[in-house]
Each structure stands twice: as structure tokens, then as C-alpha cells.
Amino acid sequence: MAAVTAPTAPAAPRTRPVRRRPSPGRVVAWVAMAAMILVTLLPFYWILRTALSSNTALAAHPGDPLPVDFTTGGFERALGLQSTEEAIAQGGSGGGLKFWRYLINSVVVSTLITVCQIFFSAMAAYAFARLRWRGRDKVFGLFLAGLMVPAIFTLLPNFVLIKQLGLVDNLLGIALPTMFMTPFAVFFLRQFFMNVPREVEEAALLDGAGKIRIFFRVMLPMASTPILTLGVLTYITSWNDYFWPLMVSYSDSSRVLTVALAIFRAQTPQTGYDWSGLMAATLIAALPMLVLFGAFARRIVSTISFTGVK
Amino acid sequence: MTIASSSPPSRLPLGSAEEAATKPRTRKARAREGGGDGRLAAVFIAPALLGFLVFLLWPTLRGIYLSFTRFNLLTPAEWVGLDNYTRMVHDPIFWDSLKVTVEYVFINIGIQTVSALAIAVLLQRLTQSAMLRGIVLTPYLMSNVVAGIVWLWILDTQLGIGNEIIAGLGFDRIPFLADETWAIPTIALINVWRHVGYTALLLFAGLQAIPNDMYEAAKVDGASEWRMFWRITMPLLRPVLAVVLIMTVIGSFQVFDTVAVTTNGGPANATNVLQFYIYGAAFGRFQFGYASAMSVALLVVLSAITFLQYRLTRAGQTDLG
């Protein structure tokens, strides 16, 4: 390590990048990093490889690194494009997966939750951070206490409530409990609004803008990056949620992808799983999040890294 | 919009100093406006407060109430006092599932924290690449259901690539999810795979707060990376580590999805974690009162752990500054 920083000569800072000789420690560290990346990413490749193989060939060549007996049958089965006989012949259960229906359900639920939750939480966060009113700190303390209540605890009573509201097996019923706020979202955005310099607000006030106008025209635009990060994280969380939708939805009309996928998996015969169909289905279910993340990855990753989403 | 662009939000800790400076003015302003922004604040906070009261506070109170009742959703709840709790105390399956859950949490948190810390330090000390950080986060994008199914396939006894490799190395195939001893550690590892990147990124955020001069100074003194890790990184990261630990422990006590998809509680109750048992009691046998009582027990356990961890790790204090 000592060789790395030869007393940093301030005279010649950036003339020529000093070639660092890799020390043994650094090599070990990079090997560890490479191993970690491999463990992280290999399953993704294996999903793709399996999804593009045929079930009969998979049984014969389980260890082949490339797709065996290349076919898109798995995807066709997952998307419900195959006839029942065809599906069973290729190792499927014949149980249908109304993929587009579930996809739309997932999109509706996740969008509804994300848009409403972030908007309402931002309003509350602004009121907690920037408005002066009696009892503010007490109410905020109450919200914070909500962070400590584990999700499982509210799930059963919430289910009873949703049932009494007649919203079981309804997309609104899935979205409702997290549509208005989560303590975390309020906390996260309040943290950001607190850090906006007071002068910004005062300048707008002098220009004759009201507090409402300031919120919409100044604060929200300024908070666009944290809001984007929080939004994508909320979208991913609600997209991936399984327990609550499993409780609330009974039929295809309100079934989201995660639940449908678990059912699809339960339907495939225990004796010979339809692995290629299952992998195709998991890939399709995960793809929207991978694309969403891919689009915003850089900004999200740095927001999390620097502000520490806690 | 000129206002917004004029000065970017500062992350400097100007909050406290500036707030103190503006306090007298604030009070005067409040007097002039008569109670500040009360009416506007009420409007702004109304939707979130409604959500909070209806879907968080009320269910919490109701859950506690339901735990003292016999309730099957069809007939009104009937008060039975402590019946559910006495039943719970005498229910061997409850204790079993609590044991299984604790075992899961220990394996999951132990491995996850150590690997997340290693990843975070590697990310900080080796490179600042945002792409690597993005890669680390990718498993987090999958749902527990997807992760469960994928590893079910990879670890399949006959056809899974994991077992192919094990067999190729000359060992016996391991029935990871079908074996009573292997099932819980396997599920714990699957969840480590999915969550470790997110945890690592949170720790990485904590590492970013440590001034780089400290490492530079230590290097000048000839300290090794190993020594710097124990003398600089660990002490300064401790508060962040404590918060992350509390969060992940709470999260990991609520394991459900992976179990539901991979083992369904089996083999022979070996993976019947508490949340799975609660779910079964409520929706399999419609014993909502009993399920609520077990949820209260879980809440108590979690509160106790949070409190203890907070005290033991002195999470509130920083060593920085």
C-alpha cells in the first residue's frame, strides 16, 4: 500500500497518471469484487438460458452453459399463447397465465400507489418541514413512531377493514393502504425539504408567490431527483409485493404478476417442473423493473449512495 | 423558475445554525399572521394524516383488540380475554415457528451484514464506479417470488446448475430445499442474494460521510488497509451500521414470500416461520383472533429487539466530530 501514495507532490498534480503497481492486496480485492459480480449476475443469465431451452433437453443436458434445444416455447406458455395440449406436450401444466391481465393489474396498482403516495407524502413533508403550525412536532413524532410498526402487524386488521369496505378482490383494495403515505416517504422527503435554503422560499414570497405556489413551482421541481429516486423505489416495492395482494385478490380480475407467478409455479407438476416456462415467466415478470431501473439507474444509485435512503 | 435555479439545495448542515438565527423573526411573523400556516398545513397534511390514521394507527389498535377476541370474519368478534394468549403459550408449533424464525434471522442477518459491509468497503476503497453500484443493486429489483423460483431451479437436486457443479466437484448432491437441516439456511441465503446489494448501498452511503483525509493521513503514517478498516471505517460507520442492522433485522423477521414459493413451510414444519404460521392461522383456518395474538407477540419481540439494539449499539451517537 505504501507505494501508492508517494508523498503527493503538489507541484505536478496531473501531468501523467502515475501507474499504480497493483499490490497483492488490491488483486485479492478485485478478485473478491469479480466473484461478487458473478454471483450477482449469473442467476440472471441462467434464467435466460433456461427460458430459451426446451424442458426435455434441459433434463438431458442440465449443465450446458448455452440454451439447449433452443425454443421460445417457454415464453409462449408463460404468455398463454400455446394451446393446452401443446403446453402439456412441452412439459407445461396446461394451466393458463393471463399474462397481459396481470401485467395491467400490476401496472395499475404500482402506478396508483407510487403517484398518490409520493404526492401526498410530499405535501405532508412540506407541511412538516416548511410550514409553521401548532402541534407540528407532535404529529411528526407520531408519524415517525409509525416507522416502528412492522407491516405484518397492520396486515390482518387492514384486511378486515378492506373486506368491510367491500374492496376485496379489487385493485383499489390492493393499493389503498399504501396510497396515502408511508412514514418512510414522509420522513425521506421532509429531510430534503429541510435542507432547501430558506432564502429560496423568501425570494419567492417577495415575488408575491403564495405558499401553495411555492410548493408546486419551487419546492417540487427542486426535489425532482429525490422524488424520482423515492418514486422508483416505491414502484419496485409495490410491484414486488406479494403478501398483501395475495391476501386481497382472489380472481384474475385483481391478480397481480407476483401472485400469478406463484400460482403458476404451484400449478406445474411437482414431479417434473416446467422449468423453461417458469423461467420465461419470471423473466417477463422482472423485466419491467429491470428496464425501469436501467433508465434511471445512475441517478438512483447516486441519490441512495449520497443521501443514504434509510 | 429563475428562483429555483438560482441556488441549488445545499447539503451543508446549515439547518441548526440558520434556524437559530431566524427564530425571533419567525415568532414575530407568526404573531402577525396569527398562528402561522395552520389552515394551509391542515390541507397539506390531510391526505397523509387520513392514510396514517385509517391504515396504520387504527389497524394497530384494532389488531391489539382482535387478539383478545375469537373472530372468523363471518360472525362478529367475540371477547375471550386472554384465551388466545394462553393458547399461544401452550402451542408447541408457535414456539417451533418462533425458533425457526430466529434461526433464519441469525443466518440471514449474519451473512448479509458481513457481505454487505465487505461489498460497501470494496466499492469505496477500490472504485467509485456507479455502474458497479448499479449491478450490485440488480437482485433487489426482483421480487422475493421471482428470486425464490429462480433459486429453486438453480438448487434443484437433479437438474439445478448448483447441484451440477457440486456433483462435478465430486461431492454428493444436496437437496437444499427438501432437507430439514438445509432448508432454512438455503432460504436465508436466497434472501441474502436479493437484499445484500441494497444493504451494501446504505452502508456505502455511510462510508461516503467519512472524510477521505482520514485515510490519507493514516496512509502517510503507514497504516495498512486492514488496520484502517478497524481503526477508521468501523468506528465511524458504527451509527449507520446500527440503524441498518435494526432495519434489516425487523425486515428479516417478516420473511414470508420466499418460504411460500419454495418450501411452503415444509419439510415437516422445518421452514414454518412465524409469519407463515400467522398467515395459515388467519386464512387457512380463519382464526383471526389467534393470528392477531401471534402478531402482537411478534410486535413485542420486534420492539424489544429494536430497543435493545438501539441501546447496545448507541445508535444515536456519532463518533464523527
Image (cartoon, rainbow, N blue to C red):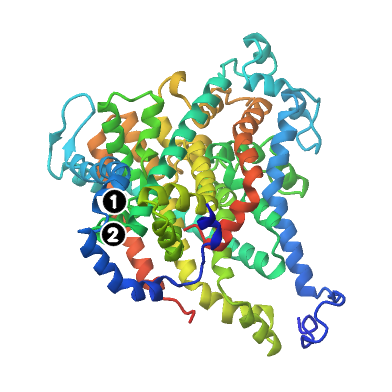
Please name the residue shown 46% across and 61% down the image.
A200
Do tags 2 and 1 sit on the same chain? no
Return the residue nearer the eye: B93 or B298.
B298
Question: What SS does tag 2 mark?
Answer: loop
Residue situated in front as seen by the camera: A53 or A33: A33
Does residue B239 lie above or below B45 as drawn? below
Q: Label 1 amino acid?
A: Ala
> In the rendered structure, the residue with mark 1 lies on which chain?
B
Q: Which residue is at the far bottom?
A: B221
| Residue wearing tag 2 | A132
Percent position (x, y) of residue B5? 56, 57
Q: What x and y, as percent, mark residue B244? A: 47, 62
Residue that mark 1 sits on:
B41
Q: Position of residue B38 (x, y in %)?
A: 24, 53
Q: Are marks 2 and 1 in contact (CB under 8 Å)?
A: yes
Q: Which mark is residue A171?
A: none
Q: Is residue B314 visible?
A: no
Three-letter residue code for mark 2: Arg
Instruction: Please tell me how crowded label 2 is: few (under 14), some (14-19), or many (20+) other residues with Cα within 10 Å.
Output: some
- Distance (Cα) linking label 2 and label 1: 8 Å
Where disc 1 sits, the SS reads helix
Residues B80 and B126: in front is B126
| Quadrant of res B43 | top left
**Looking at the image, which residue is at 40% across and 73% down?**
B18
The residue depicted at 69 percent of the width and 64 percent of the height is: B128
Give how far across and how far down residue A182 sits, in percent: 38, 47
Name the subunit of mark 2: A
Vertical side of A174 occupied by B139: above or below: below
